[in-house]
Amino acid sequence: MTNETLDAVGGASRGAERFDHWIDGWGAAPVGGAYRPTTSPVDRSVSFEIADGDGRDVDAAAVAASSARHAWAATSTAERSDLLRAVGTAVRENLDGLVEAEIAETGKLVAHARAEMLSCADYFEYYAAVVRTMHGETIDQGPGQHTYTRHEPFGVVGIIAPWNGPLNQASRGIAPALAAGNTVIVKPSEFTSAATLRFARLASAAGLPHGVLNVVTGTGPAAGAALVRHDAVRKVTFTGSVPTGQVIAGIAAERVIPLTLELGGKSPLVVFGDADLDRAALAAATTTLMNSGQVCSATTRLIVERSAQDALLGRVSAILEQKQPGVDFGPIITEPQFEKVLGFFESAAEAGATALTGGACYRQGAAASGRYIAPTVYKDVTPDMRIAREEIFGPVLVSLPFDGFDEAITLANDTEYGLAAAVWTGDVARGLRAAHLIEAGQVAVNGGVMTQETPFGGYKRSGYGREKGAAAVYEYTQVKTVSLGLAPQELVS
């Protein structure tokens, strides 16, 4: 890495730290020689310069990952466990540098960025433990046969990470993929690459063998598509938008390789009239503020019993109106997403929705120089409105009333997505019944907690496959059945 001045995509930037790819345990300059700036959403200044890679850089990473895969797969689960634990320790010992890089490109609050980096360490420590329990099964076919299954790695795995939680969401794929014995090539978002590149250097320094973890940066069309198309890549994990996921799925279908896809959501937060409205309001405000709504599983579609709607919305609005940009919530990370959220506000106004609070970006003060959106609550929303159907990915809560249990479930499921959901009710049995009927991969009832141990993934257009939990290790393996015919003398002995 150097601090040279260069002409990068989007203009020249002076004095910014420059990052190369990380391939085969070393920094690797982009074959094409180009770099692109990443910017801070806090004030739109240049943060870093990132290698602008393409298929040639993916080729180099694939060669390294392919060369390392047999030796890595041959290590014992105990050896892989020790190395993963060392990586987790390295993250904890170098937390400040990772947090700094994350904040520079995402504008996250310090507490939020630290929590996400600590979660990265948790992933490696968790899968260091899980891999020690990985096992196949024996199948009884009578005394003349010894038949069993093995979980074997795919080989080289490609992980394409999003910009909203760059290192955290990359880590939830990297850790189980490595635990299962695969080598990995990561393609982070071109908007938020620095923390992942710093992490890769730490992982190598912690003892991860060269070629086991590689990072190639660049755009989706130039680097991401090349990664999915590469003959050496035998499985791909992608987190991002439905349209991009569809493109990736098309390439994967042609190549006949498996995918894990997490494609976003429009997750319902169902509140019954007998719920603790103060707790429900805090939950609704928290999901709106968390990463400024830039969370795939954010439950920002509030479905509330009509008799409690005004009381609940009053509580939520009162909480959000007290929050300050840069103190209580961060900015929208990318310029295209910032403009997209503003477009939703225009659509909502034209459709007749009422903004109880927010509904605009900041035009004055320090926040005006960044991509800050005021936390927003909408009432008078109908199920056909864009704000009720499309993923906004901003600090925007939309409210839909219901009059009975069946209508609540119908509204909750009236979406093409099915990633997550939440239910608040004074009747626990009703809450669990609702959880069973809602079409989503995760449902929290009355504040139930989801952690590294709980499988995560979607129904419907939210994708398929599961991340997190012990199940994720098996997403990165393929089952082999072995059957041994026993000779008569072996049976006697």
Image (tube, rainbow, N blue to C red):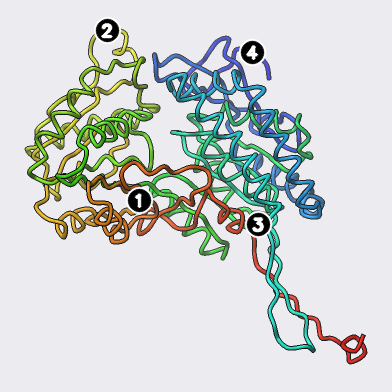
Q: CA distance from mark 1 to mark 3?
A: 38 Å
- Given this view, does label 1 or label 2 mark the residue nearer the observer? 1
In the picture provided, is 321 more to the left or to the right than 13?
left
Q: Nearer the viewer, residue 385 or 269?
A: 269
Q: Which kind of residue does numbered mark 2 sit on?
A: Gly
80 and 348: which is toward the camera? 80
Q: Amino acid at mark 3?
A: Asp
Mark 2 or mark 3: name the one nearer the start of the chain: 3
CA gap between label 3 and label 4 equals 35 Å
Relative vertical location of residue 146 with respect to residue 182 in this rendering, above or below: below
The reply to whether the C-beta atoms of the residues labelled 2 and 4 are less than 8 Å apart is no
Nearer mark to the viewer, of 2 and 3: 2
Q: Secondary structure at mark 3?
A: loop
Disc 2 crowd rating (10 Å Cα; few below 14, some 14-19, many 20+) is: few
Horizontal and vertical percent position of residue 271: 20, 44
At mark 2, the secondary structure is loop
Where does the image place residue 114, in percent across and percent down from the top left?
52, 24
Q: Which residue is mark 4?
A: 3
Above or below, 329 against 235 in this view is above
**Residue ID at (81%, 51%):** 75
Which residue is most to the top? 365
Q: Going 76% across and 38% down the picture, which residue do you hit? A: 208
- Sequence order check: which comes first, mark 4 or mark 1? 4
Where does label 3 land, which residue? 231
Instruction: Count the marks.
Output: 4
Mark number displayed over residue 443 = 1
- In space, the residues marked 2 and 4 are separated at their CA atoms by 32 Å
Badge number at residue 365: 2
Q: Quadrant of residue 198?
A: top right
| Quadrant, the C terminus | bottom right
